[in-house]
Image (tube, rainbow, N blue to C red):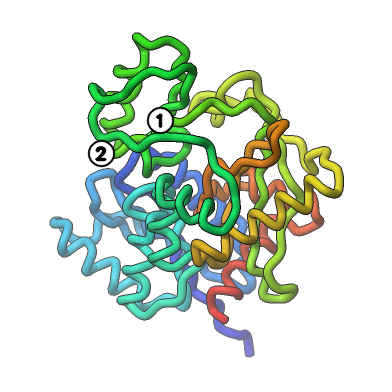
Amino acid sequence: MALRRIRVAVIGGGQNCEHDVSVASAASVRAALDPARYEAVPLTIGRDGRWSGPDGQVLGTLNSRSLAGSLDVLATCDVVLPLIHGPLGEDGTLAGLCELAGVPYVGSPLRAGALAMDKWATKLVAEAVGVRTARGRLVTDASTVDFTGPVVVKPVAAGSSFGVRLVEHEADLEPAVRQALELDDRVLVEEVLEGREIDIAVLDDPDEGRRTGPPLEIAVPGLFDTTVKYDGSATFVIPAPLDDTELKALEDSALRVYEALGCRGLARVDFFLTNDGLVLNEVNTMPGMTAESQVPKMFAAAGLSYSDLLDKLVRGAMR
């Protein structure tokens, strides 16, 4: 007698600027889940907030009915794999929905998602546990910002580098802040750091315990912005060439921030490695999850295939 397959609700889409990235992650994950063990149940959140079910049809005609319909589908599933990047997803929103629905889910709980999505809060937590961050200022009004030299402007709670701009001239600062304020009501203006961009992935492995993957270095001239992130011009070096001291410092700092934020399941912790040591950039609690995304590539370099990584995430959530 064949064992019943585990029903995994794979949620993609979302109501933010990372909608298309999330759709790609969800499609890739559905295709890679082992069909002998898992039944992938697709759910998509449209840009208008309405949910579509496995057949692609909108669940109801109004947002409230649509959400109610999605809960009916979630109730038939054993576990949720929420692949919404950015606000109204990665920020703890979906984790809270799963908690209320009583369905196990992959990834960080509500509090950790909210803290990590908020780059300003992440800086405060990291500094409190001894992990250095870039000097910066939180602003809510473009007209109040003084130019003190080259800076990076970024929305506090947006992902995939949307709204991020390198500002080298005073005349460009206020327009850059205004553009970032279109994506969030708070904006960070940070010092420009010269150094190597190194990412560390943290996995709560149900078989081996919490561990990190091989470090990844992003080799790209200039700013790793949204265009470069998705046009294929960036090169990922795995494992990043580091000496033992550098690697240990990066891994220890990644784990320290991961634990302080209360992350769970998986996260990518991004650093700059400067002449003065490492500096935390940001934490992604639901990073891109196509086979070509950074985290799957990092663990693949350690011998963990894409489908096996997904298997560990699902089993860890159910445990």
Residues 201 and 195: in front is: 195
Q: Is residue 31 visible to us here?
A: no
Residue 169, image x and y in percent? 43, 10
Residue name at image x 52 percent, y 45 percent? 282
| 62, 57: nearer the viewer | 62
User: Which of the image's four quarters has the C terminus?
Assistant: bottom right
The N terminus sits in image quarter: bottom right
Q: Residue at x 60, y 62 (%)?
A: 33
Q: CA distance from mark 2 to mark 1?
A: 13 Å
| Residue located at (78% from left, 53% from top) | 248
Amino acid on which disc 2 is placed: Asp
Q: Position of residue 246 (x, y in %)?
A: 78, 45
Query: Which secondary structure lies at badge 1?
Result: strand
Q: Is residue 215 left or right of residue 184?
A: right
Q: Nearer the viewer, residue 301 or 110?
A: 110
Characterize the local packing of mark 1: few (<14), some (14-19) or many (20 or more) Cα atoms within 10 angstroms.
many
Location of residue 189 (image quadrant): top left
Residue 95 point in image, percent of width and height: 39, 66
Q: Which residue is mark 1?
A: 189
- Are the residues flagged by discs 2 and 1 in contact, CB closer than 8 Å? no
Tell which tag, 2 or 1, sits nearer the viewer: 1
Q: Residue at x 49, y 52 (%)?
A: 26
